[in-house]
Image: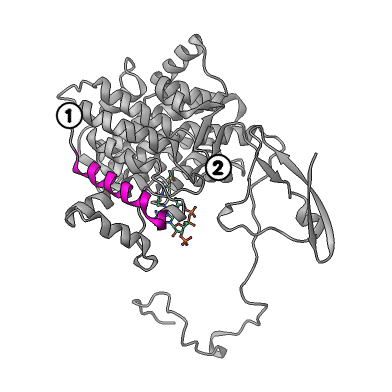
């Protein structure tokens, strides 16, 4: 076994080097603090492995993504989302019987508890569907308590996967003030969702195979991405032994931000902004290069991928196909391609190794499918569910696992003596916390 040596204050410490199955290396510093009193400082955790995992492998230099060993390109071309979900959660591809049963469970469990419908009535019509989604998933733990227990874990996993699409479609209906449409057990996972979005009690909706396939593909490419911000959040929350629903609800909230899953909405808003501004995409490239502008090219860059994001490659090709098959022309697609073309030639992006990520083209496909912009991240969340669940399950089954609890380096004030308010000096520079309020002391 190879080791790594660290010398601090003239003292030498030796640590084991851990090797993954794909040859990745890590220095196991889990005994560092106990032995030396030192901790490591790694803001943003860019160099910190938080766990060992068997779920997903990424090689960011080579643009490799594999779920349980299967390349994303093969799964995207040949598998369907429910079997990919099974693969991620249970570690192997389902055989014929397992798949039939799994699909059956995913449709039979699609119905929400009837009392949950009341919650929808009390969200304001302008509520963002990600807020509804996160709240509703957390509230499932009130209807199905004990979701962290061994005996019920599998039934809660399937219930969550099955109901997520119903919750998502209902939140869309709510935002339009339309009546809810119940799932049909004869439909596939993706088709059920689309039907619940677009059918009305007055009119049935025929799900086109192109739309069904496109959604299935989008869900599949989003299904897991190892220790990203939301998956780490799920593990962080779950490490306190919080139940499945509470942990996943936290993951949904983490995904919402524009630097993570919320980027798919932000990309379309950016492209629309460029179009409204006359289509001058080069101006926006220059803005992205100017640190003072506060503007970033949304859908570009990735913490791990440094040459290309294989999911973006799949979706760029799918984008052309889906728009073609649906007979949709979208001027935003041209703007996106122009932006990408210029950025890939520009030194600023080349030097920083910034490439389109999964969110750059996904929004254009969602738009072509008629999905409103504020639902994009919800669809990402539905796709990512199997990954979060697999991460939560793996963490929970690791009996040697500990509660997640990073350390810090304190850089605040040293010990001070407390003074009563009449003895305190006025500090000019201190901002008033509630500057617009006045109240008697
Ligand atoms: N536009 C312009 N400049 C960028 C961008 C961008 N999209 N992304 C990174 N940079 C620059 C940074 O300013 C920084 O420059 P510097 O070295 O001169 O200071 C350098 O590239 C490195 O960027 P970091 O922010 O340090 O990279 P990090 O790994 O922390 O962040 C992230 C990755 C959040 C994805 C970032 O690239 C970004 O903000 N992208 C836009 C938002 C986005 O698309 N998010 C979705 C990611 S995929 C996903 O979560 C599903």
Nearer the observer, 241 or 296 = 296
Observer able to see residue 197 = no
Tell me how far mark 2 sits from mark 1, CA to CA. 38 Å
Tell me the residue at 66%/32% (across/down): 21
Q: Quadrant of residue 291?
A: bottom left
Judging by the rendered image, the residue that carries numbered circle 1 is 327
Please name whichever residue, 266 or 289, is drawn nearer the observer in this view of the structure.
289
In the rendered image, the quadrant that contains the C terminus is: bottom left
Ligand 1 within 8 Å of the CB at mark 1: no
Secondary structure at badge 1 equals loop
**Residue sitting at x 41%, y 58%:** 348
Q: Residue beneath label 2, please?
A: 227
Between marks 2 and 1 in the image, the one whose residue lies nearer the viewer: 1
Residue 319 point in image, percent of width and height = 29, 34
Residue 308 appears in view: yes
The magenta-colored residue range is 330-349
Q: Position of residue 376 (x, y in %)?
A: 32, 40
Vertical order, 339 against 172 (above or below): below
Q: Please state if 183 lies on the left or on the right of 350 as rendered.
A: left
**How dense is the environment of label 2, judged by Cα within 10 Å: few (below 14), some, or many (20 and up)?**
some
Q: As drawn, is 71 to the left or to the right of 132? A: right
Disc 1: CA contacts within 10 A as few (<14), some (14-19) or many (>=20):
few
Residue drawn at the location 31% of the way across and 61% of the way down: 286
Q: Is residue 42 magenta?
A: no
């Amino acid at each position: 076994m190879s080791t790594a040596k660290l010398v601090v204050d003239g003292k030498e410490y030796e640590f084991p080097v851990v090797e993954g199955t794909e040859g990745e290396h890590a220095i196991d510093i889990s005994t560092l603090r106990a032995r030396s009193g030192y901790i490591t400082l790694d803001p943003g955790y860019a160099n910190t492995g938080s766990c060992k995992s068997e779920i997903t492998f990424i090689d960011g230099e080579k643009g490799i993504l594999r779920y349980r060993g299967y390349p994303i390109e093969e799964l995207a071309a040949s598998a369907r989302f429910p079997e990919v979900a099974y693969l991620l959660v249970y570690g192997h591809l389902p055989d014929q019987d397992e798949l039939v049963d799994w699909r059956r469970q995913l449709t039979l469990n699609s119905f929400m508890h009837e009392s949950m419908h009341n919650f929808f009535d009390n969200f304001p019509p302008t509520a963002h569907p990600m807020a509804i989604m996160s709240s509703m998933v957390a509230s499932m733990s009130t209807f199905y308590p004990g979701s962290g227990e061994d005996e019920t874990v599998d039934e809660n996993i399937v219930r969550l996967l099955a109901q997520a699409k119903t919750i998502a479609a209902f939140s869309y209906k709510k935002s339009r003030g339309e009546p809810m449409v119940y799932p049909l057990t004869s439909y596939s996972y993706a088709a059920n969702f689309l039907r619940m979005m677009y059918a009305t009690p007055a009119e049935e909706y025929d799900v086109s195979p192109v739309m069904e396939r496109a959604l299935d593909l989008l869900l599949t490419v989003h299904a897991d991405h190892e220790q990203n911000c939301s998956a780490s959040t799920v593990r962080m929350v779950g490490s306190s032994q919080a139940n499945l629903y509470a942990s996943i609800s936290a993951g949904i909230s983490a995904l919402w931000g524009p630097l993570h899953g919320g980027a798919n909405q932000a990309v379309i808003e950016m492209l629309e902004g460029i179009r409204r501004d006359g289509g001058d995409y080069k101006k926006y490239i220059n803005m992205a290069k100017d640190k003072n502008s506060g503007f970033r090219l949304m859908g570009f860059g990735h913490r791990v991928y440094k040459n290309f994001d294989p999911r973006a490659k799949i979706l760029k090709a799918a984008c052309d196909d889906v728009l073609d098959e649906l007979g949709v022309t979208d001027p935003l697609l041209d703007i996106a391609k122009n932006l990408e073309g210029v950025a890939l030639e520009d030194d600023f992006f080349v030097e920083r190794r910034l490439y389109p990520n999964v969110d750059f083209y996904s929004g254009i496909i969602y738009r072509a499918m008629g999905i409103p912009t504020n639902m994009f991240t919800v669809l990402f969340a539905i796709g990512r569910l199997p990954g979060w669940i697999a991460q939560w399950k793996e963490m929970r089954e690791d009996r040697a696992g500990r509660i997640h609890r990073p350390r810090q380096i304190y850089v605040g004030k040293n010990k001070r003596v407390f003074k009563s308010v009449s003895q305190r000096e006025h500090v000019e520079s201190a901002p008033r916390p509630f500057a617009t309020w006045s109240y008697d002391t």
